[in-house]
Amino acid sequence: MSESNQPADKNPERTDGSLRGRTILVTGAGSDLGATCCLSAAKAGASVLLLDRKKRLMEEVCRQVDACRKSDPAIIEFDISKAGGADYQSLAEGLAGLTRALDCVVHCGLATWPLAPVVNSRVEDWYRIHDREAVQPMVLIRSLYPLLKKSGSASVVFCTMSAGRRGSANWGAIGSAFASLENISETLAEEWESHNIRVNTVDITSMPSALRTRYYPGEVRRKPKSDDDYGLGQTLDNLLRSDSVTTGQRITLSP
């Protein structure tokens, strides 16, 4: 499966309403990355479900989504870092009460971890990081499989970072966790293709975000030239549309 530096299913223009009628769940919705995804989907006509660990993190994003979508976005408090099997089952049941089917999931709930050389890293951190960045996202998506299957044309997008695609000094535990998530995404893409559920990853490392600032603290944060700088909105629009055929791809946002 190839890696692409271009938006999938290339369209020359993004058109309003391209996601009309689609219900989208965005994890990590309270972050700036999650907010960008929520607002992009709402502007394209989607109904947005916001998920994060605290309601207060999502309230402002929810207001913005409501203002541009003129609908009733839902806020869902759910802490992936502390969730167990029963919690995911309850989440799936709760979502089933909100929507008949789930058309899209965009996983933006990435955490920040300390960078360290392999020989100086703590073994317990490897377990924690792999659980949070690879295992828990997999369990989340697996629990939502029945709702995704009802869509008839579902799409799952995992946001990842470049260290998961090529090993980099001091990123050992984090990079290997994202590499696992990339592999999980490709595995699901093949297993779920017959159910019309597409699964892709998008490397968001180049985006000027709070996550990047925490990993690259000495860097001058660049102000985006436009609302869709780096093409995240266009990329998501192309991947989440009901007529998209892109699956099993590793897509990279270019600076």
Image (cartoon, rainbow, N blue to C red):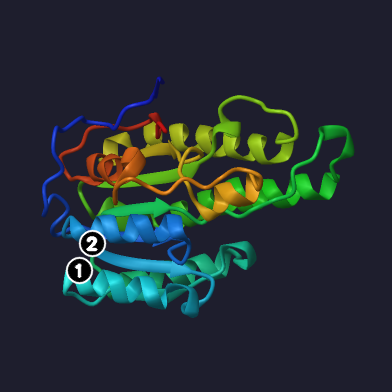
- Please state which of residues 96 and 79 is positioned toward the viewer in this rendering: 79
Q: Are marks 2 and 1 in contact (CB under 8 Å)?
A: yes
Q: Quadrant of the N terminus?
A: top left
Q: Position of residue 201 (x, y in %)?
A: 43, 37
> Which residue was labeled with disc 1?
68
Residue 158 vertical position relative to residue 210 in the rendered view, above or below: above
The kind of residue on which mark 2 rests is: Ala
Is residue 10 shown left or right of residue 64? left
Q: Residue furthest top?
A: 2
Which residue is at 47% across, 45% downward? 222
The CA span between labels 2 and 1 is 7 Å
Q: Position of residue 158 (x, y in %)?
A: 44, 45
Residue 91 visible to an observer of this rendering: yes
Which residue is at 85% across, 46% downward? 122
- Please state which of residues 44 and 131 is positioned toward the viewer in this rendering: 44
Q: Quadrant of the C terminus?
A: top left
Which residue is at 64% across, 35% downward? 175
Residue 198 visible to an observer of this rendering: no
The kind of residue on which mark 1 rests is: Cys
Residue 62 vertical position relative to residue 20 in the rendered view, above or below: below
Q: Which mark is residue 42?
A: 2
User: Image quarter for residue 10?
Assistant: top left
Q: Which one is in front in this view, the residue at disc 2 or the one at disc 1?
A: 1
